[in-house]
């Protein structure tokens, strides 16, 4: 596959190397030659020094043949503009845009690109760990708005149905339950056992409510 990476900072250089190692053709564009020189010696893709907004720069680089583009510069505005151009003008099938300032997140989304906000995701993950490190997130969708968590069932919930645990919590849905190394699809009438590993998909509001419900298990 053929990918473009716009911006060769820490994220861009790491992404370019990963894509290259995966067998893809990679074009990296940055206006700073020193940034391009920072690419790993293992990278054997194409590098272009120049302003990505310069007239016909993307066309000369072959953007029309790209299967995907990632705009990962340190400018939200530049990322949005280049992402929009790639999507609407050059019809690149997959466009991923990096977000720095959470205030700009709605603007980037308005351009119709896939947005990855390391700031928003990182802040939420740190908040979760500070509140309760025992709730381990194993998958994050979007920018962390929805995550899949591993939750260990405490003794207080032994013998009680899953439906009771998730009652009145529409922001938390069961994904899988693992017992003695065997995973099953859980249902409302599934009887919980102490030590079960329950995977749930939840928003921050949903996982917070689940924490409170687990703590009150002895009273349910």
Image: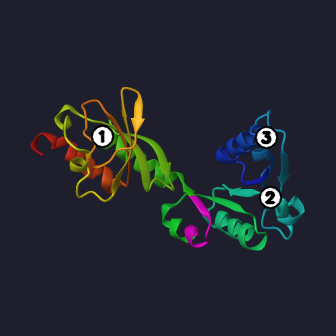
Q: Alpha-carbon distance for marks 1 and 3?
A: 40 Å
Instruction: Give the percent coordinates (x, y) of residue 160.
Output: 19, 41
Q: Is residue 92 left or right of residue 102?
A: right
Which of labels 1 and 3 is toward the front?
3
Tell which tag, 1 or 2, sits nearer the viewer: 2
Most distant residue in the front direction: 189
Q: Which residue is mark 2?
A: 66
Q: Quadrant of residue 16?
A: top right
Label located before the other in sequence (1 or 2) = 2
Graded by Cα atoms within 10 Å as few (under 14), some (14 to 19) or many (20 or more), the crowding at tag 1 reads few
In the image: residue 186, left or right of residue 115:
left
SS type, badge 1: loop
The span from disc 2 to disc 3 (Cα, nearest Å) is 15 Å
162 displayed left or right of 138: left
> Going from the N terminus, do you reach mark 2 or mark 3 first?
3
Please state which of residues 52 and 136 is positioned toward the viewer in this rendering.
136
Residue 1 sits above or below residue 57 on the image? above
In the rendered structure, which segment of residues is drawn in magenta? 108-115
What residue is drawn where x is 51% and y is 56%? 142
- Circle 1 is placed at which residue position? 132
Where, by quadrant of the figure, is residue 80 drawn? bottom right
Image point (63%, 61%), residue name? 75
Neighbour class for label 3 at 10 Å: few (<14), some, many (≥20)? few
Q: Secondary structure at mark 2?
A: loop
Q: Which residue is mark 3?
A: 23
The reply to whether the magenta stretch includes residue 46 is no
Q: CA distance from mark 1 to mark 2?
A: 43 Å
């Amino acid at each position: 596959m053929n990918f473009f990476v716009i911006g060769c900072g820490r994220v861009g250089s790491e992404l370019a190397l990963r894509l290259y190692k995966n067998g893809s053709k990679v074009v990296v564009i940055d206006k700073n030659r020193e940034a391009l020189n920072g690419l790993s010696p293992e990278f054997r893709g194409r590098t272009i020094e120049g302003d990505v907004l310069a007239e016909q720069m993307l066309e000369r680089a072959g953007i029309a043949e790209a299967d995907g583009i990632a705009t990962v510069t340190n400018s939200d505005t530049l990322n949005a503009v280049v992402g929009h151009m790639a999507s609407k003008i050059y019809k690149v099938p997959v466009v991923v845009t990096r977000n720095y300032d959470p205030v700009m997140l709605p603007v980037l989304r308005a351009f119709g690109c896939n947005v990855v906000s390391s700031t928003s995701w990182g802040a939420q993950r740190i908040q979760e760990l500070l509140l309760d490190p025992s709730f381990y997130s194993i998958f994050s969708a979007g920018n962390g708005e929805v995550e899949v968590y591993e939750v260990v069932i405490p003794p207080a919930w032994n013998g009680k149905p899953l439906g009771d645990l998730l009652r009145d919590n529409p922001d938390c849905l069961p994904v899988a339950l693992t017992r003695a190394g065997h995973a099953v699809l859980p249902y409302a009438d599934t009887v919980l056992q102490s030590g079960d590993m329950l995977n749930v998909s939840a928003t921050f509001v949903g996982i917070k409510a689940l924490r409170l419900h687990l703590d009150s298990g002895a009273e349910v």
